Image (tube, rainbow, N blue to C red):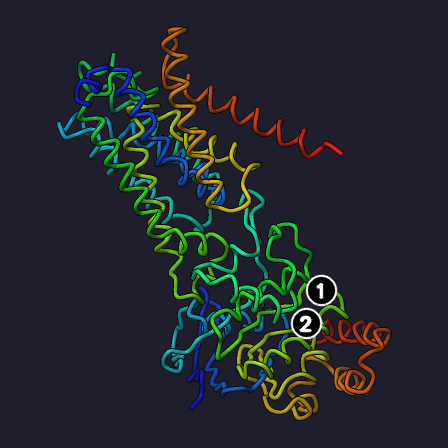
């Protein structure tokens, strides 16, 4: 096993699978609750976390996690205070990305690495990264497993949740926390600009095949893992950037699934 | 002992007082209906009782271990969320297939278990919501404008079913409606709400109370009689509904 992990392609594939596993069920909630922009804002803010982590010399994971959490709680707190949610998220997402990029430019010697944070650097995943990615993914999966019923009930209707003794705001916090962790572990794999894609696309592609929330999450996880491993292979064969290749394959699977189900339903 | 007891409950949203010093009790087995114009705080009252709305002043007391079945006013299920009726019934507590079938039968939704929630008609959807509320074997069933979007015969049938459920389970029922004529005839007690409790009592008493007439006009009392004597004639209902709307506008 240790010998296996020496191969950078194996490490990259495992990293991709780990991120896809955690992103898929969380992505389902992002789709059901219409939080796509929310995911974007959290992901974009993490570049600021990278800058902070580099300048204070702490781990990138910790910096990104803290920034993503701060962003997600800010958005939750500001929601419903006079601005439309999409405006608010648009402002926060792009300005935090801009501030992050400016902040990184102040740091000497980082400029060349910027692309790695924007688009991921999956082929450079080391054993330590792998441990962080899988640790984070397992934490997210455990959290979602534990709160699954409560999360679903709160997603359906906040009053229904209240009547069942569930606090919808606490469930929102659970999702916020899970999102921050996924962003922090996925930054190495697909980069801040494409994290939202790993959340949304497999979940959206899985929708036509699912009759229950659980089956949608499982199908999304399978599609995500397929995109991660297949995208890596494509990147290797055609010498394309790995993160974007993974997202391209996920997008193609979405198109195929949607078209396929439309044709199937259209059949007499 | 009362299932629910409100003492001088007040709720403010921003600068607006939505509820002011509302006191009421719900006793085991009774059907209580809350009526009132739009914006009179009916939904806020129910949300306070289920714990979704914080009180600004006063207190909501629930009997210890009280089991509440709640049927919300409307439930929008996002089309991206796949959900069968059977799966919906197991939220948040998992229930056995037998229990689920039993509740669906009681709610008159016996054959819907395998259907997708998004494909149900308005009436089917309401019956499924009722079935879900019955799963916890409630001591108190709370319905918030449960027949919105149903036609007249549909909502009359729904309320008849509620009365049947009350007979079978012996639970108390608290509901909000603006379909006065249908609801009042099925109630033991009516509470007329307009930010505060205007008047309350037996349906006949409330319908003739001056406070009630000030809010809804006098037409509804006649309709109550109409309903009681000729409730199979939907033609009369239609005629009445116009009268009611008219009075309602006049009241506002």
Residue B70 image position (x, y, % from top left): 51, 69
Quadrant in the picture for the C terminus of chain B: bottom right
Q: Are marks 2 and 1 on the same chain?
A: yes
Q: Quadrant of residue A225?
A: top left
Nearer to us in this view, B60 or B32: B32
Q: Which residue position holds label 2?
A: B158
Nearer to us in this view, A268 or A48: A268
Residue A38 image position (x, y, % from top left): 41, 39
Instruction: Please report, as a chain letter, where disc 1 is located.
Output: B
Q: Are marks 2 and 1 in contact (CB under 8 Å)?
A: yes
Residue A109 image position (x, y, % from top left): 18, 13
Residue found at x 33% / y 51%? A146
> Which residue is most to the front?
B98
> Which residue is most to the left?
A57
CA distance for labels 2 and 1: 9 Å
Residue B89 image position (x, y, % from top left): 52, 60
* Relative to B193, B182 lies left or right: right
Instruction: Please report, as a chain letter, where disc 2 is located.
Output: B
Which class describes the residues within 10 Å of circle 1: few (<14), some (14-19), or many (20+)? some
Quadrant in the picture for the N terminus of chain B: bottom left
Q: Earlier in the sequence, mark 2 or mark 1?
A: 1
Nearer to us in this view, A12 or A173: A12
Q: Which residue position holds label 1?
A: B150
Instruction: Determine whether A100 is above or below A179 in the image.
Output: above
Instruction: Determine whether A243 is above or below B216 in the image.
Output: above
Residue found at x 56% / y 69%? B102
Q: Secondary structure at mark 1?
A: loop
């Amino acid at each position: 096993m240790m010998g296996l992990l020496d191969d950078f392609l194996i490490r990259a594939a495992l990293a991709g699978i780990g991120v896809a596993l955690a992103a898929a069920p969380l992505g389902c909630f992002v789709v059901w609750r219409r939080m796509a922009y929310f995911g974007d804002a959290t992901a974009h803010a993490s570049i600021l976390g990278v800058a902070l982590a580099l300048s204070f010399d702490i781990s990138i994971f910790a910096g990104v996690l803290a920034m993503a959490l701060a962003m997600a709680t800010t958005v939750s707190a500001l929601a419903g205070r006079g601005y439309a949610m999409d405006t608010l998220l648009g402002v926060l997402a792009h300005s935090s990305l801009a501030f992050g990029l400016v902040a990184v430019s102040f740091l000497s010697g980082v400029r060349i690495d910027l692309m790695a944070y924007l688009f991921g650097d999956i082929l450079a995943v080391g054993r330590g990264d792998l441990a962080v990615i899988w640790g984070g993914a397992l934490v997210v999966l455990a959290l979602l497993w534990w709160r699954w019923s409560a999360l679903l009930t709160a997603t359906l209707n906040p009053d229904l949740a209240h009547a069942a003794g569930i606090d919808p705001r606490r469930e929102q916090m659970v999702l916020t926390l899970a999102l921050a962790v996924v962003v922090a572990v996925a930054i190495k794999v697909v980069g801040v600009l494409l994290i939202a894609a790993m959340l949304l696309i497999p979940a959206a592609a899985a929708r036509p095949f699912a009759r229950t929330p659980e089956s949608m999450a499982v199908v999304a996880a399978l599609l995500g893992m397929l995109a991660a491993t297949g995208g890596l292979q494509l990147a290797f064969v055609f010498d394309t950037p790995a993160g974007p290749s993974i997202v391209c394959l996920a997008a193609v699977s979405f198109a195929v699934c949607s078209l396929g189900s439309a044709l199937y339903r259209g059949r007499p | 002992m009362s299932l629910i007891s409100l003492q001088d409950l007040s709720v403010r949203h921003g600068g607006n007082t939505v509820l002011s010093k509302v006191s009421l009790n719900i006793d085991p087995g009774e059907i209580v209906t809350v009526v009132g114009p739009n914006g009179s705080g009916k939904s806020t009252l129910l949300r306070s009782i289920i714990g979704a709305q914080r009180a600004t002043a006063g207190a909501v007391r629930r009997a210890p271990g009280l089991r509440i079945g709640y049927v919300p006013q409307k439930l929008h299920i996002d089309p991206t969320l796949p959900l069968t009726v059977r799966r919906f019934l197991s939220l948040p507590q998992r229930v056995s297939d037998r229990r689920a079938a039993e509740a669906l039968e009681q709610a008159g939704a016996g054959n819907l278990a395998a259907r997708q929630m998004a494909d149900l008609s308005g009436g089917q959807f309401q019956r499924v919501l009722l079935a879900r509320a019955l799963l916890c074997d409630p001591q108190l069933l709370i319905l918030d404008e449960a027949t919105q979007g149903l036609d007249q015969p549909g909502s009359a049938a729904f309320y008849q079913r509620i009365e049947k459920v009350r007979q079978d389970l012996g639970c108390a029922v608290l509901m909000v409606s603006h379909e006065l004529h249908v609801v009042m005839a099925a109630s033991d007690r009516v509470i007329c709400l307009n930010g505060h409790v205007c008047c309350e009592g037996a349906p006949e008493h409330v319908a003739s109370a001056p406070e009630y007439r000030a809010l809804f006009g006098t037409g509804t009392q006649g309709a109550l009689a109409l309903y009681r004597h000729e409730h199979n004639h939907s033609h009369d209902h239609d005629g009445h509904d116009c009268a009611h709307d008219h009075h309602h506008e006049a009241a506002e």
